[in-house]
Amino acid sequence: MNGRTGAKGGLSLIDLSLCQKRIAVFGETKNEVSEGRSIRVEKNDGEEKDVISIDIIGAVRKHLAALIATFVVVVVAVCGYTFMQTPQYSATAEVFASYKGAASDGSQTSDMTTRSYATSYINTQLQSYPQLVKTEAILQPVIDEMGLNTTVESLAGKITAQQPTDTFLVDITATDPDPKVAAELANNVAKSLKDQVSSTLYSSEATETSPINLSIVQSAQVPVKHSSPNIKMNIAIGIAGGLVLGLLVAIALDLLDHKIRQASDLQDILDVPVLGTLSRNDVYAGKAPVVISRPASREAEDIRRLRMNLTYVMPDKGDHSNLIVITSAGVSEGKTTTSVNLAAAYAEAGKKVLLIDADLRNPSVAKALSMNGTVGLSQLLTYQVKSTDAIQQYWKENFHILPAGKRAPNPGILFNSKAMKSLLDQVSDLYDTVIIDTAPLKVANDAAVFVKEGATMLFVSGLGHGEKNDVRAAAEEMETLDVTVAGAVLNFSEEEKSDDNYYYYYGDGEDGKSRRTRRSTKQSPKKTKKS
């Protein structure tokens, strides 16, 4: 690499001047914006600690297909049940009860005590008539009269009776698939009840007469419309039940879903702003960052947008304020892909950039850039090589890579060493931006070491891949270590679908010429796995 100087203690680097800029945003410095956007991970304390927050709208959005499927199944089932039922017709006959003793003397005025007794007696007796009409004494004469081939128990299931409030009336209703039979049943049951009550029911001897007299005041008419099923009501119940059950299914699926599916899933656990979203696309699996291989693509614009957003959350002053440490909760969530592409975006913007692969357990940067990574950070920190032998130039003169080198059995010790601190001091002074790719927090908390040295942490989460439990564990650990997360990046996002939302990009065709292509967000990129 051209321009390298001699090493002091094996750790000297290229003598590059540090370009410092203060970016004003709406009249405020970048440092002020950082204070408003960098959010510390906090846990709920006290009574709120065990409260489960349910994002109903988010659950509906994520599981809309399940909600719709449940709704359709319930509505179809209710409609099927309704239309498969045999229509039933109901007819009602009405009888009136009177007390014989109350008017037996034929006078115009009666004793008030007698009237009161009669009223109380009739009310008491009428309360038992709804059950009386279902007994053998009432229904067997009806069966014999109509010549029905049924039992008392079966016929009782078709007969109901009720006493309207504050009346001496009894409504007797019969239900049958045949409307004529329904009317005939109601009339015959009313007649049988009248005969039994008015003659033999209250008489122990033939000479005695019943104190209750029943009169049929309304005969049952043949019904024109069926009484059941109630199609409109059943469909309304099906629709309401389908919506409620679908909503419950969506909420249940959301509570049982342990994956990070959207920004709100991550922000509910790790309360940080989302600074960028990278789509699921084959272009990230290429041998070069997208700003190099596809500079006019939408994916390249997403990386540039992330770079720009980072400038608003990074501190303006302080030791190592130009260091960015990138990590994730779990493995294979795209942190290395984010690190490589973000570093290239800074280099494209003219910044002097150093990308350090600090994942000494599973180095990935050199492989992602098709570079030789046998010599790098691990040898540099153990004084086996000089920086001129470890750091490589890539693409531009202002873009440098420090691979991980040989895998180290004790990365934690190396990162907490004086050599590591000395390295950070030097690169922070010599470069505009230093990006550090570290191990996932599920594997090790190496990222916390760099944040304690003043680096800004960028948290990467893979949609549909990251585990909520891993993020929770990372959030708890960062809170314990008093580590602040500046922002998050969402990977593997599906492109939004729209019929009228199109963008124009200028890209290089197969013939090497620049051409304009019309890209619709209706594309469905193939799934790729980011490192």
Image: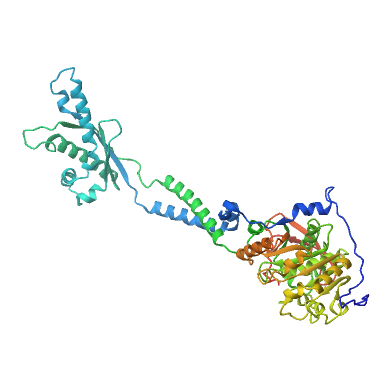
How is the structure coloured here? rainbow
- Taking depth in this image into account, of 192 and 53 the one nearest to the observer is 53
Regarding residue 70, the answer to whether it shows in the image is yes
Outermost residue to the top? 108
Residue at 74% across, 75% down: 413
Image quarter of residue 329: bottom right
Outermost residue to the front? 418
Residue at 85% across, 47% down: 27
Regarding residue 487, the answer to whether it shows in the image is no
Q: Is residue 438 above or below residue 190?
A: below
Image quarter of residue 114: top left
- Taking depth in this image into account, of 149 and 298 the one nearest to the observer is 298
Q: Is residue 476 above or below residue 170?
A: below
Q: Is residue 201 above or below residue 323?
A: above
Residue at 49% across, 53% down: 245
Q: Quadrant location of the C terminus?
A: bottom right
Q: Is residue 304 left or right of residue 39?
A: right
In percent of width and height, residue 346 lies at: 84, 65
- Taking depth in this image into account, of 301 and 315 the one nearest to the observer is 315
